Amino acid sequence: MPVIRFVREGCDVECFPGENLRDVALRSGVELYGLKGKLGNCSGCGQCITCFVGVADNLTGPPALSALTPVEQRKLRGRPRGWRLACQAMVEHSLVVLTRPQLGWAQGEGLLAAAAEAPLPAGPIAWPTPPEDPAAETEQSATADEAGTDGPIAGDTVR
Ligand code: FES
């Protein structure tokens, strides 16, 4: 499972391969948006260009994110290399991400490079367990009641 290290937030988050980076960030409580994006964003349609992230180059392994979409090729023209739109990127492998890179990119780029030096956990790290199904629990206890829990009593016929 890919692990995303969010540098600004200081946390590692695990996701399924192929998950949308914006979806994973929002699900994990990571703030993707600056003021403009908080006031209004396109909810992941690739239109508002407020979900910028900076990603560290993976020089040794396969690309961590899906290839640039046509929307990104248009909207990221003139932006620093390594910037992506989170709503357009699918996570394939572990990577290091800087949210809101527009807030001091010169410093952020250094943070990103330093964070990329530290090895990422292989995962799984803390994949959430699904909640218990209360219906299955009720069914199980009813079955146990029918079967009896005391075992055979002297004189019972055991087959
Ligand atoms: S959320 Fe609008 S471009 Fe990504």
Image (cartoon, rainbow, N blue to C red):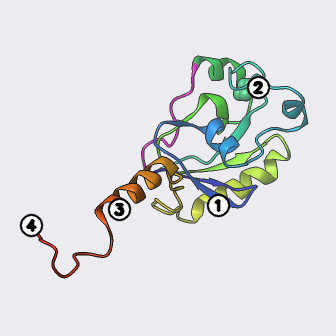
Quickly name the residue at label 1. Answer: 115
The type of residue carrying mark 3 is Ala
Q: Is residue 103 left or right of residue 5?
A: right
* Distance between mark 3 and mark 1 Cα atoms: 53 Å
The local crowd at label 1, few if under 14, some if 14 to 19, many if 20 or more residues have their Cα within 10 Å, is: many
Whether pointer 3 and pointer 1 mark residues with C-beta atoms closer than 8 Å, the reply is no
Residue at the (9%, 67%) spot, across then down: 159
Check mark 2 vs ligand 1: CB closer than 8 Å? yes or no. yes
Of labels 2 and 1, the one closer to you: 2
Residue at the (33%, 71%) spot, across then down: 149
Q: Secondary structure at mark 2?
A: loop
Q: Secondary structure at mark 4?
A: loop
Quickly name the residue at label 2. Answer: 49
**Magenta highlight on residue 68:** yes
Of labels 2 and 4, the one closer to you: 4
The local crowd at label 3, few if under 14, some if 14 to 19, many if 20 or more residues have their Cα within 10 Å, is: few
The local crowd at label 4, few if under 14, some if 14 to 19, many if 20 or more residues have their Cα within 10 Å, is: few
Task: Give the x, y percent position of residue 40.
Answer: 86, 26
In primary-sequence order, the first of circles 3 and 4 is: 3
Residue at the (61%, 28%) spot, across then down: 88
Of labels 3 and 4, the one closer to you: 4
* Distance between mark 2 and mark 4 Cα atoms: 71 Å
Residue 159: mark:
4
Residue 144: mark:
3
